[in-house]
Image (cartoon, grey):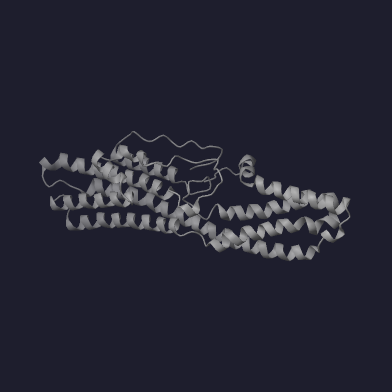
Amino acid sequence: MIVRRNLSWRGILHYTWKSLLYYLLLAVAVYLVHDYYQLVYLSMPFSTVTALSTALAIFLGFKSNNAYERWWEGRKIWGLLVNYSRAWTRQVITMVIPGEEADAPAVKELQRRMVYRHIAFVHALRVFLRIKHAYNKTNLDEIYQEANRYSDIQAFLQEEEFQAFYHKNNPPNFLLELQGEDLQQAFKRGWLSDYRFVKLEDTLVEFNNIQGMSERIKNTPFPRQYSFFSRVFVFIHASLLPFAFVSELGLATIPVSVVISFVFLALDLVGERTEDPFENRLEDVPLTALSLTIETNVKEQWGDKDFPARQATQEGIVL
């Protein structure tokens, strides 16, 4: 997620330089052919491009709004995960109660295991959501990208649990199953009443819902017709601009057409790179930062002072 008010021009040019080079070369070519070779028929009425500009602006605005709604929904879902994580930790600590004094060490170990397994679940969900589908992969190198590996979870699980977790098709869901099994064991041993068992189970269900909502966004791409046609229309618009300006502006056609083309390109890219909020890109929902926030909160509730290091902000980017 970008938090700095002013964007880095290095970053902007990294994602736009190929298109800008095309706009510049086309504008130069149209100007030279029109002015030096007197091919007047290369020009076209400005009203033609005006109509296209208006339609394109409306189309790109619609696309950007809907893309932002997907991003904001992803952020709200992970906000719920922060809240329910705190509630889960509190419930595990206060509701799992030993029936006898002799059970106190076993209950304490069960609580610790469930609390730290939840931290593992949060980090596992982050890694799981950032695994790229083939249809979302691009040939573009990202400026900022975090390592995405399940080995980060190993410290929070028992060795046999981690080995089983690592080979699952849906590792986060497997951890929720283990949490449910521990709740069942605590209920059978009398450490949970019916009511307390139901309350903890309800919180587990909320984690299932949070994962399911995140997967819905992850596994349902933004309608490709919007993405495809917006790129096509921006290309057509940029290709026509120099022909509309060259008769009236002459040499000024070059900077004017490049600047206007860049505006529409930027609008298209804003939507394009916002529509998928879990792709481990600089514009995404900051899953790592939120995961570390949850880990810190949960550890503090448990009494563990070994908090994770705060994530360093790189040029105004929080991942």
The part of the image, by quadrant, that contains residue 143 is top right
Q: Position of residue 176 (x, y in %)?
A: 28, 51
| In the rendered image, the vertical position of residue 261 relative to residue 298, given as above or below | below
Q: Position of residue 8 (x, y in %)?
A: 62, 41
Is 120 displayed left or right of 191 in the figure?
right
Identify the residue at horizontal 26%, vertical 49% (top origin).
Answer: 91
Identify the residue at horizontal 41%, vertical 34% (top origin).
Answer: 309
The part of the image, by quadrant, that contains residue 115 is top left
Q: Position of residue 139 (x, y in %)?
A: 55, 47
Count of residue discs: 0
Is 269 displayed left or right of 189 in the figure?
right
Identify the residue at horizontal 82%, vertical 51% (top origin).
Answer: 31
The part of the image, by quadrant, that contains residue 212 is bottom left
Question: Which of 212/73 is in front?
Answer: 212
Q: Position of residue 109 (x, y in %)?
A: 20, 40
Identify the residue at horizontal 71%, vertical 64% (top origin).
Answer: 52
| In the rendered image, the vertical position of residue 55 relative to residue 252, given as above or below | below
Question: Which of 52/135 is in front?
Answer: 135
Is 97 displayed left or right of 52 in the figure?
left
